[in-house]
Image (cartoon, rainbow, N blue to C red):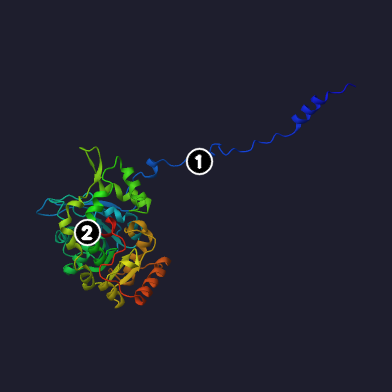
Amino acid sequence: MSTLPEESLEEELQSEEPKQPPLPSAFASLPQRPPTQSSLEKYAPLDWVGYFDEEKDISIPDSNDVFHVYMAGTEGPVIFCLHGGGYSGLSFALAAGKIKEKARVVAMDLRGHGKSSSENDIDLSIETMCNDVLAVLKEMYGEQPPSIVLVGHSMGGSVAVHVAAKKTLRSLHGLVVVDVVEGTAMASLIHMQKILSTRMQHFSSIEKAIEWSVKGGSLRNLDSARLSIPSTLKYDDSKKCYVYRARLEETEQYWRAWYEGLSEKFLSCPVPKLLLLAGTDRLDRPLTIGQMQGKFQMVVVRHTGHAIQEDAPEEFASLILNFIARNRIGPHGVEVDTWAPSAIAVTNLIFHQVASSSLLTDGQIASPGLFFIL
């Protein structure tokens, strides 16, 4: 029997050994990742249907003013929502989807905002906006409106307080103000024009505007941004892009009147009151004293930005419903299952902090910003 050469034996043995994969190189390409959503899909607008039940245009007699409202729910008191400057009624969309299970919700596009139209969109004087709200309520409900809770965010909070302070809305049974305090707002006014002028002014698409609002930090809830941001824009044919619907930079003459004396007006309103804040450092002296005297309920909602109703809609809705239940608002009151756990902890925490801390100086400010006072 003949023998194989040594070289042939070595080659045969090597071929039988399992081949080891080559060591990875530091310069190898990155491993394949699963496909991700495109920006167009991720930031695509969402429809309000499913959160609100219907929308209406409310025409005001003897004028050319038409105010757009979104409505949800069929029974219970009316939670009448007023948005902040530069926002729209859809700012309350996600929260409305939960509130409507126990109460009715109406969210109004204020003058110069959203789908509302008026003879003078620049007239955002506090008196004009108060008259707008009262006119819309009268057209919707006549002389016998149901139990109403006014809920106002930022600029809308100022409008809600001024309407309540007039004491002409007989069916008003509650007032909720969202993240606006006189001292801080007044101190922030000097920064507003600069902030308005330096923000992004033009958007090539609605998706880009939604993306900017989330990445820029003005809104922290992507779904809410997809619902509300489109209604804050309009298409400019001359510039071939989207711009802001509200011309806030042209309304500076009215800003001071929104907030001067706001704390005392809030405390004087003869209805149950709730103040929702995004931070403990936003109280001024009158409100700190008033809260310690038990004149209103206050809750600090943690981990949100200025638009609490958008950033934490479920917690916001729970706080509104519990406020209604606690104060037995409506013909038969509203029954709720339980407090939101985080709301209980936050409420207890802030009551303790305010009672044990020194009073803040008037006008104390954490950081100026557009989405802080408008």
Q: Quadrant of the N terminus?
A: top right
Mark identifier at residue 190: 2
- Give the residue at x 31% y 60%: 367
Residue 132 appears in the rendering: no
Mark identifier at residue 54: none
2 and 1 marks in contact (CB < 8 Å)? no
Of residue 326 and residue 6, the one placed in the foreground of this image is 6
Residue projecting furthest to the front: 26
Rendered view: 329 above or below 217: below
Question: How many numbered marks does the figure carry?
Answer: 2
Q: Quadrant of the C terminus?
A: bottom left
Of residue 224 and residue 51, the one placed in the foreground of this image is 224
Residue 351 appears in the rendering: yes
Q: Which residue is mark 1?
A: 34
Q: Amino acid at mark 2?
A: Ile
Q: In front: mark 2 or mark 1?
A: 2
Location of residue 260 by image quarter: bottom left
Q: CA distance from mark 2 to mark 1?
A: 48 Å
With 202 as the anchor, is 341 left or right in this view? right
Residue 127 % position (x, y):
14, 61
Residue 331 % position (x, y):
27, 69
Q: Mark 2: few, some, or many residues within 10 Å (few <14, many ≥20)?
A: few
| Nearer-N-terminus badge (2/1) | 1
Q: Amino acid at mark 1?
A: Pro
Of residue 78 and residue 297, the one placed in the foreground of this image is 297
